[in-house]
């Protein structure tokens, strides 16, 4: 890192550098993009590989190896939050998914009597598309922060602002701001390469790697009349998609009916449920 907090004073330290970062011509955003062969694995299997990879990022020991952190004369740490196992992952259609993540870096080392502390973070969008033959993934929409409050977009010339609406680090120069962006971009390139290696090893193997999809007959049998939508989501571990919603008459009484479907990632199996006044009233399934 090219900036430090020394005795609570911000100073620029170290040699600065910059380079032209690649821009996606379709979005106008700085990006890193790569892909891996899927070797005939199903959509669910590929997504499970990504989930397994995300879990490895929670292991500090693993990240020390991935980033080759040197703690012999300093304390250096990288943490990555990329919750690919979360149901909050946005389905953009066409087997494309988007989720937000954060990479945080800190370093502490002793110079004389006082420690020098470096800290910063970059948040990003991570998107991936699963096609018949390839897993295509991209890091983009990058924003840097020194305090996790004020952010500066990588496409802009202005660094993040401080509490007084001034540029970070006493009006950081454009060259220094470019150096910070370049350094964090390089950190994300390491992460991209790690995903390629990790996913490639699993996807190219001939062993089954998938976790059992929650859209199965065993789960279907557990869905009973009177269950709420939240009960079903808890059982199936994923939100459904609404097919219809309206008012109808049953025995002369107006009731709300909502039909929701839960699809397997391969979109070959599904569970369809009708809720009447918020409770399961009927269900059907396909290919379970």
Image (spheres, grey):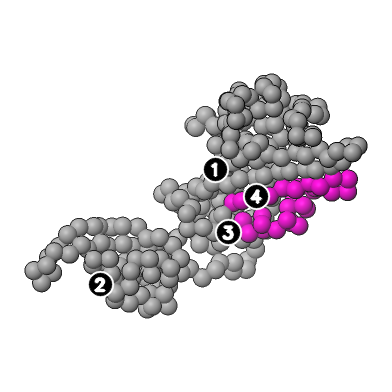
Looking at the image, residue 251 lies above or below residue 138 = below
Name the residue beneath numbered marker 4: 80
Which label's residue is closer to the chain start, 3 or 4? 3
Q: Residues within 10 Å of mark 3 (few under 14, many from 20)?
A: some
Calculate the distance from the C-alpha at mark 4 to the C-alpha at mark 2: 43 Å
Q: Is residue 113 visible?
A: yes
Name the residue beneath numbered marker 2: 281
Disc 3 on helix, strand or loop? Answer: helix
Give the side of residue 150 with respect to residue 75, left or right: left
Magenta span contains residue 73: yes
The residue nearer to you, when weighing 162 against 179, is 162
- Locate residue 10, reporting x and y percent: 74, 30
Looking at the image, residue 34 lies above or below residue 230 = above
Name the residue beneath numbered marker 3: 51
Quadrant containing the C terminus in the rendered view: bottom left
Quadrant containing the N terminus in the rendered view: top right
Q: Which mark is residue 194?
A: none
Labels 4 and 2 touching (C-beta < 8 A): no
Looking at the image, residue 60 lies above or below residue 143 = below
Q: Residues within 10 Å of mark 4 (few under 14, many from 20)?
A: many
Disc 1 on helix, strand or loop? Answer: strand
Magenta-tinted stretch: 54-82
Which label's residue is closer to the chain start, 2 or 3? 3
Q: Nearer the viewer, mark 2 or mark 3?
A: 2
Residue occupying the point 54% across, 32% down: 29
The residue nearer to you, when weighing 226 against 85, is 226
Name the residue beneath numbered marker 1: 125
Disc 2 on helix, strand or loop? Answer: strand
- Locate residue 121, reporting x and y percent: 65, 40
Residue occupying the point 31% across, 62% down: 260
Residue occupying the point 27% across, 62% down: 259
Calculate the distance from the C-alpha at mark 3 to the C-alpha at mark 1: 16 Å
């Amino acid at each position: 890192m090219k900036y430090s907090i020394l005795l609570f004073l911000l100073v620029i330290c170290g040699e600065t550098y910059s380079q032209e970062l690649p821009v996606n011509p379709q979005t106008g955003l700085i990006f890193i993009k790569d892909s891996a062969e899927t070797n005939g694995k199903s959509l669910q299997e590929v997504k499970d590989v990504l989930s397994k990879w995300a879990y490895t990022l929670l292991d500090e020991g693993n990240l020390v190896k991935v980033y080759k952190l040197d703690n012999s004369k300093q304390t250096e740490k990288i943490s990555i939050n990329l919750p690919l196992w979360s149901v909050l992952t946005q389905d953009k259609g066409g087997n494309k998914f988007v989720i937000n993540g954060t990479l945080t870096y800190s370093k502490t080392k002793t110079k004389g009597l006082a420690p020098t502390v470096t800290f910063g973070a970059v948040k990003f969008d991570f998107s991936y598309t699963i096609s018949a033959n390839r897993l295509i993934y991209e890091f983009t929409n990058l924003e840097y922060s020194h305090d996790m409050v004020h952010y500066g977009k990588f496409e802009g010339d202005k660094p993040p602002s401080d509490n007084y609406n001034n540029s970070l680090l006493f009006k950081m120069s454009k060259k220094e701001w470019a150096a910070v962006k370049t350094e964090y971009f390089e950190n994300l390139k390491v992460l991209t390469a790690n995903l390629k290696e990790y996913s490639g090893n699993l996807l190219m193997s001939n062993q089954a790697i998938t976790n059992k999809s929650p859209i199965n007959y065993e789960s279907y049998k557990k869905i009973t009349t009177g269950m709420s939508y939240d009960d079903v989501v808890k059982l199936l571990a994923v939100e459904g998609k609404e097919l219809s919603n309206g008012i109808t008459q049953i025995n002369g009484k107006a009731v709300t009916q909502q039909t929701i479907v839960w699809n397997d990632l391969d979109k070959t199996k599904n569970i369809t449920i009708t809720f009447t006044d918020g409770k399961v009233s009927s269900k059907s399934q396909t290919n379970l």
